[in-house]
Amino acid sequence: MDHVIPMEEFHLGKVERKEAGESSRDNDQPVIVAGETHKLMTSTIQGSTSSKEEKFKKLKEAQAKVQLGTTPEIQEMGEPTIEGSSSSKEEKFKKLKEAQAKVQLGTTPEIQEMGEPTIEGSSSSKEEKFKKLKEAQVKVQLGTTLEIQEVLMLRDHKHYQKYCEPRVVSLGPIHHGKPKYQLTEVYKLMLADKFIGKTGRTDEELYGIIKDKIKGLRECYDEKVTQKYSDEDLAWMLFVDGCATLQFIDLVAHHENVEDFKIKNDQVAFVQQDLFLLENQLPYKLLDYLMKNIKEEENRKMEKNLWKSIQIFIDMHSMLADGTEFQNPQNAVHLLDLLWKRLLGLDGVKDESAQKKETGEKPRSPTVKRSKARTRRMINTPPNKNEENDERDLEWHSFRNVQELREVGIHLKHSKSRSLRDIEFTKKCNFYPGILWMPKIVVDDSTGPMFFNLIAYEMCPDFENDFGITSYIYFLDSLIDEQKDVIDLRNAGILHNLLGSDQEVADVFNEIGTDLVPNLDIYRDVRVQIQKYYKMQKKMKISPVIHTHFSSPWTVIAFVAAFFALGLTVVQTVYSILAYYKG
């Protein structure tokens, strides 16, 4: 039955539901709020199902919005369906059809409040607990497929929310359904419908392809983030998100006009950041399924064009030089994985762990260089005590920042390579000065979130890697303590500051460089060479004098001029003395 509630009491929270004669929250019971000038609003009770027709109707409405130029507005929405509750295929597609009707009638989508989430930690049977224990053992023995999961190791970091949570759009199941992302659901439908129209297939055909692959796609995620979704709900979510993502990337990569979708430039920038968040990733195989299932023969080239768009999009965020070769990497996990491989120069390299799994062999740990003393310890050979102490002294660097490197005559220069692994130290004339070569990077608003999520990705328990990004940020953070360090790196062409002040850049790297555990074998040779040079110059006491008195070319010119004038004075004096005695 329906209950009519005065608007004043509704807003003051004075209305309480009575247990007697009132159905539970799980029943499809609408609550009607009355008011003279207010619209009647029906709030669908959580757990209700939506038909297949309604979902596709919403998709068509999104298309109509693009054509008619209607801009979505933020309004109040009714309560959404509880995440994970099953909804019929017919009602889901019906929602898509309703979207088209709303556009034609001039109505706009509304943001609703979220229902109460399912309480975690519900009791499970004894058998289920032991089953999980056995499954964990099997995973260790067989090796697990890298899964998309929540950030774990950095979850207590004070900047976790700032760097890990999406700003405007949620993709995939982890943040799906949160109220702050409801408005962008409409834009995703618009973009998805545009993509479907280019494939030559109907929306139901393309959805059916994803539905048939849902078991494998579910396995791409950590079980706990998808367990509340039925196969149909998860398939629909991935279908819409995947189509929208490919269409958005294609638009941005080719600088097409996103204003046709009523998307502003600031929103475009935020969406690009959100596409590289670990908790916002879509399986690459999902994108691959959508790209390969193009029906019309004349549109077959679209697959190559879409991959080219992904390549351009990754390069836009990887700070690499134009024209560098980008191969279609095998065993790509998601977009963040593609970016990680690109930054470290690993794109196009077949994943060794995947090869080992195919043959049943155990994957090897990354190959690293070791010092002589460390190798002796590994094979139980008695070490030379002096040599081992020297090794330890060199591995523990005593320099703290760029300023101290400059004091001992180490210059900074940018290298031609853009791979973050390519950091070198050389000495001019094998003596002085020392030169530290580093790749160029661009620092802007996306730098912090990008590197933070790449570090979180390397920390995933099921991701076997050598912590390349973590080690790079650790090394760079060891050079940056204050604003002066950033200025020197910027003047050397290593940092291109698009963020703001130099102090802000220093703060970013100090924030994301906190609590990192790097692979010390990466850049070990560079650190050891710098430390040797540092200790040698400290003993000689020459470099500090040069740094203090000859840091500017004008001081050098002034010194040369003064020395030349002094020389002329001496020569003139000598000639005067000689002329006196001869006379």
Image: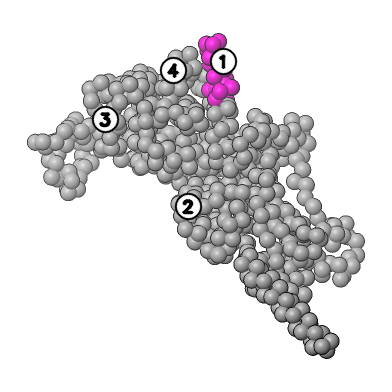
**Element on which disc 4 rests:** helix
**Element on which disc 2 rests:** loop
Instruction: Read off the residue under disc 2.
Output: 499
- When asked about the image quadrant of residue 399, the answer is bottom right
Percent across and percent down for residue 210 are 51, 22
Mark 2 and mark 4 residues within 8 Å of each other at the beta carbon: no
Percent across and percent down for residue 58 are 34, 23
How many angstroms separate mark 3 from mark 4 (CA)? 23 Å
Instruction: Read off the residue under disc 3.
Output: 108
Percent across and percent down for residue 165 are 45, 46
Residue at screen point 57% across, 53% down: 495
Within 10 Å of disc 2 (Cα), the crowding (few <14, some 14-19, many 20+) is some
Percent across and percent down for residue 114 are 34, 40
Specify the farthest residue to the top.
297
Instruction: Read off the residue under disc 1.
Output: 300
Q: Nearer the viewer, mark 2 or mark 1?
A: 2
Which badge, 3 or 4, is on the more N-terminal residue?
A: 3
279 to the left or right of 143: left
How many angstroms separate mark 4 from mark 1 (CA)? 14 Å
Which badge, 2 or 1, is on the more N-terminal residue?
A: 1
Q: Amino acid at mark 4?
A: Gly
361 to the left or right of 182: right
Q: Nearer the viewer, mark 2 or mark 3?
A: 2
Residue stretch rendered in magenta on the structure: 288-306
Which residue is nearer to you in this view: 460 or 537? 537
The reply to whether residue 130 is in sight is no
* Predominant secondary structure, magenta span: helix
Residue at screen point 63% across, 34% down: 323
